[in-house]
Image: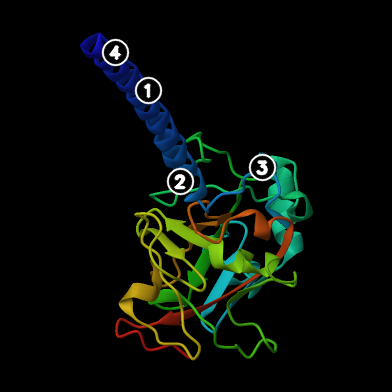
Amino acid sequence: MGLFKKAVDRAVSDKATQKRRKRMIVFIAIITMLSMVTSTVAWFSVNTFAGVDTLDVHISVSAQLKVSMEDHGTNLDQYVKIITNDMIDGYLGSKYNTKLADIKLDPVTTNNGTTLTNRRGTTREPNKNSYLEFECYFIATEDMWVHLTTEHSDLEGDNGTKVTSSSPSPRSEVVQCTRVGFTTETNGTTTYEPNKGGAVTSLPTFDISDPMNYSDSSRLFHLDEMSPKKVTIRLWIEGEDPQCDDDVQDADLSVALSFVGTDDQNVPIS
């Protein structure tokens, strides 16, 4: 009788142990799932076009450089020193039936600077609640490498390259996850990352200093004397950036781009 009771007790104990193990396995699985979810800090968590509420894009160029929204060949009189928002609106209106004020930036990511996808890997189209893209043509009166610059030209006052936000913190941190890409047929894509931190994708990026330090790594593209070159400019919010979370939704973003030409030794051409 005593042996039978011990056998029953052992069987009950084994079943209880198995139940506890099953519960523990389920509990551990739940904890693992939670840790996977909470460790993802990038991307907006809501599926809306929250991005950037307003945009202010200003492009200026230094001496020896001119730019236009169209290819005017070698007719320098048709090129200008500053591209205004109205000029970009004209481009967006004719090609995409939209304007800067209507552009929303929803987080996207890219590993090549030209194909941008959302979090699910779906390719997004430019200027459709995703990212801003427009084309312009640069021309120079002599051979040069073109760089972004934080220095001010003689055209007007504070017009160096900068990416800023007038939104209060933490929404102003949108500047940490902003990217600006420049693509040409001959020089490929170069991507400017303001306030660059650690790499978050395989796409190479660069930042610029103030005061400026021109180098090979900050070159955007090369211009041959009196030969216009088409440049595709893209502005997006990098979803993989750790700063791209709900805190930066509905932020204001201002982007000023200023360009300078240098010789092969990266010395600015005056």
Q: Helix, strand or loop at disc 4?
A: helix
Q: Helix, strand or loop at disc 1?
A: helix
Q: Among all residues in the image, which is located at the extreme left?
A: 3
- Residues packed near mark 3 inside 10 Å, few (<14), some (14 to 19) or many (20 plus): few
Earlier in the chain: of badge 1 and badge 2, it is 1
Which residue is disc 4 drawn over?
Answer: 5
Residue 9 percent coordinates (x, y): 31, 18
**Which amino acid is tagged 4?**
Lys
Q: Which mark is residue 35?
A: 2
| Alpha carbon distance from label 2 to label 4 | 45 Å
- Of residue 246 and residue 252, the one placed in the foreground of this image is 246
On the picture, is 36 further left or further right than 106? left
Earlier in the chain: of badge 3 and badge 4, it is 4
- Residues packed near mark 1 inside 10 Å, few (<14), some (14 to 19) or many (20 plus): few
Q: Helix, strand or loop at disc 3?
A: loop
Which residue is disc 1 drawn over?
Answer: 16
Task: Choose mark 2 or mark 3, whichever is in front.
Answer: 2
- Of residue 84 and residue 114, the one placed in the foreground of this image is 114
**Which amino acid is tagged 3?**
Val
Quadrant, the N terminus: top left
Earlier in the chain: of badge 2 and badge 3, it is 2
Task: Choose mark 1 or mark 4, whichever is in front.
Answer: 4
Q: Which mark is residue 46?
A: 3
